[in-house]
Amino acid sequence: MIRKQGYVIFKLRTSNIDQIAASKELQQALYKRTLLIVLLSQTLGGAGLAAGITVGALLAQEMLGIESMSGLPTALFTLGSALSVYVVGRITQSYGRRSGLSFGFFTGGIGALGVVLAANLNSIILLFIALFIYGAGSSTNLQARYAGVDLAQKHQRAKAVSIALVATTFGAVAGPNLVTPMGKVAESFGMPALAGPFLLAAAAYFAAGLVLILLLKPDPLLVARLIEDNKANLHHKETEHAPQGLVQRMGVIVGASVLILSQIVMVAIMTMTPVHMKHHGSTLSAVGIVIGLHIAAMYLPSIITGSLVDKIGRVKMVFASAATLTAAGLLAAFAPGESTLLLTLALILLGLGWNFGLISGTAIVVDSTTIHNRAKIQGSIDVGVAIGGAAGSLLSSVIVAFTSYAALGFIGAYLSLLLVPFIIWASVTKRFNGINQEN
């Protein structure tokens, strides 16, 4: 058995893309190898992602001195992620996952270094520009979830997405808990303490980019396209039939709606929680622990979630997402500001609800696209996700400044419930029967 596996690995390394596309055995070997590479890059990328979430708002508040603008950093790097996800999507569509994803991570690393420089120079303008560029890392981190899906069978799709997401957990959970140590490292070099986590982000994003550019070959997307082309040539017909066009189009709309609404609610409440806690006397370490557990809830349940999405169906998990996000918003609204325990529970539910929405929504999008248009459509949808997140972040700071954190929680709960009637309408009118699949 071990000898056979060794032979397959050797054959994979010495085969060209045409030979891999013609061999089921080599395709499965490449699928497993791709998942391992994505696992490694996502672990590194997760650490870079966590820095901006944990201290971005606090750094802006310290430099600006205005609490009502503390949601601006998240809005800026989310807007930056919107632009970068479009660029990464186009590069991926033309040249494959390897080129697109490595470009995104390298760009995010450059942005993180820019934030460090801005903090040292106390330059607000440079901070805004750098945060915008830094957003490329977070969008690429999400885009990487599709890399494992390219060679996956239909019953493996949600699980493949979940493996990429759970890998992010390791770095993302470690990141917030390194806030204080990295702050001390920064101070030892004469830098502001809040610049420290962005040093970690730069190193993590550059490392993730290197892993992909050096190891993600053959490119899974290019191999998957060749496989589909070979099937089409063999059967003398298109691999995806036109009569399914309406179902696919509505599937993309449903999947995109789930992804965008989940992102808006999660980002809005998450962004203002550190500021809310700090306002009620919480330490930076406490904030780091809460955000770390929140990010763990965003990614760690992914393996179980992926299996559930594949086994019980996409729509049931969308309803679970809506219910969990609603509970998170209500708990955040009613939790006392000094109660770290209740706020932690609220953010764990928030992360879990987002996880349900992300994996079920992603599976719906993958089901509704072909391998030839998938990267382009995925990129376009993730632009909408990024813009929605930016809007949620920016508006959350305004809502809290002019009303309260509790009001933000209630609004988040209300928005989460909007998913339910929309999915029911799509199901009842039979405009999208894909959500009723029991995979």
Image (tube, rainbow, N blue to C red):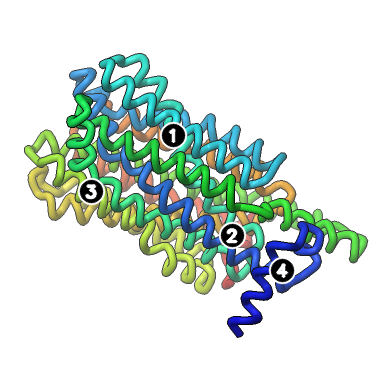
Label 3 is placed on what type of residue? Answer: Asn
* Vertical position of residue 283 compared to residue 346: above or below: above
Q: Are marks 2 and 3 in contact (CB under 8 Å)?
A: no
Point out the frontmost of discs 2 and 4: 4
Q: Residues within 10 Å of mark 2 (few under 14, many from 20)?
A: many
How far, Cα to Cα, is label 2 from label 3?
A: 29 Å
Label 1 is placed on what type of residue? Answer: Gly
How far, Cα to Cα, is label 3 from label 1?
A: 20 Å
The secondary element bearing badge 4 is classed as helix
Q: Residue at x 65, y 53 (%)?
A: 217
| The N terminus sits in image quarter | bottom right
* Between discs 3 and 4, the one toward the N terminus: 4
Q: Residue at x 84, y 60 (%)?
A: 230
Relative to the observer, which residue lies in front, 114 or 145?
A: 114
The residue that mark 1 highlights is 109
Identify the mark at residue 11; answer none if there is no mark: 4
How far, Cα to Cα, is label 3 from label 4?
A: 42 Å
The residue that mark 2 highlights is 34
The residue that mark 3 highlights is 177
Decide if residue 95 is on the left or right side of residue 332. right
Residue 180 screen position, x and y as percent:
18, 41
Q: Are marks 2 and 1 in contact (CB under 8 Å)?
A: no
Label 2 is placed on what type of residue? Answer: Thr
* Between discs 4 and 1, the one toward the N terminus: 4
Residue 226 screen position, x and y as percent:
79, 56
Residue 3 screen position, x and y as percent:
63, 81
Q: Residues within 10 Å of mark 3 (few under 14, many from 20)?
A: many
